[in-house]
Amino acid sequence: MTTRLVLIRHAKSDWADLTLDDHDRPLNDRGLRDAPRMASALAATGFRPDVILSSTALRAATTADFFSGALGVPVEQQERLYGAPAPVLLRAAAETDARAVVVVAHDPGMSVLAGELSNGEIAHMPTCAVARFEWEASDWDVATSIDPDEWTWETPR
């Protein structure tokens, strides 16, 4: 059995209104262009997750909604994913017990986790980057204790 994890850093956010709380920042024009394009690209691969987990921050939730629409899977928002470090992101995916999980969240946690899973080959997850990891293992503990059997990384630029 295969275990799949897709990490998606939220799309580019808008800093125009500095009075907004960080949690409430929306996507900017580039983010609103990149998110549906990257969501369509992931859907075109035939990948279908069992669950999409997202940070509760507006920019992450909006990004996740684009992927939800393209993949036909509802979003489960989790407050703990807002600003979460790499171990929390991975634990959230593993705790679903699903075989294919998408996590939409923030840096630096996303870049750290993608870097760890790619043995340092992914140095940074730019906004709306999509990193896919696959293990030929049915147990998350086993899967994430070994190197992925394959992985890909796409950025909107």
Image: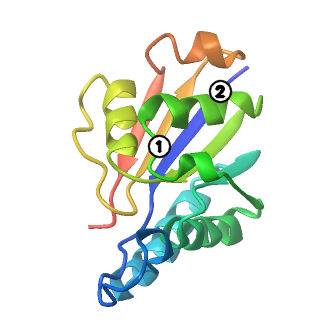
- Residue 76 is marked as none
102, 2: nearer the viewer: 102
Residue at the spot 41% in from the left edge and 75% down from the top edge: 34
Residue 136 position within the rendered picture, expressed as x and y whole percent measured from the top left: 61, 17
Question: Is 32 left, or right, of 93 in this rendering?
Answer: left
**Residue 58's image quarter?**
bottom right
Q: Is residue 83 above or below residue 87?
A: below
Residue at the spot 54% in from the left edge and 43% down from the top edge: 6
Question: Label 1 is placed on what type of residue?
Answer: Ala
- Mark 2 or mark 1: which is in front? 1
- The first of marks 2 and 1 along the sequence is 2
Q: How many residues crowd mark 2 within 10 Å: few (<14), some (14–19), many (20+)?
A: many
Judged from the image, the secondary structure of the residue bearing numbered disc 1 is loop
**In this rendering, does residue 43 appear at all?**
yes
The span from disc 2 to disc 1 (Cα, nearest Å) is: 22 Å
Residue 106 position within the rendered picture, expressed as x and y whole percent measured from the top left: 42, 53
- Residue 3 is marked as 2
- Residue 84 is marked as 1
Residue 3 position within the rendered picture, expressed as x and y whole percent measured from the top left: 65, 27
92, 139: nearer the viewer: 92
**In this rendering, does residue 48 appear at all?**
no
Judged from the image, the secondary structure of the residue bearing numbered disc 2 is strand
Residue 144 position within the rendered picture, expressed as x and y whole percent measured from the top left: 53, 18
Q: Image quadrant for the C terminus?
A: bottom left
**Residue 39's image quarter?**
bottom right
135, 87: nearer the viewer: 87
**Residue 74's image quarter?**
bottom right
Q: Is residue 141 above or below residue 129?
A: above
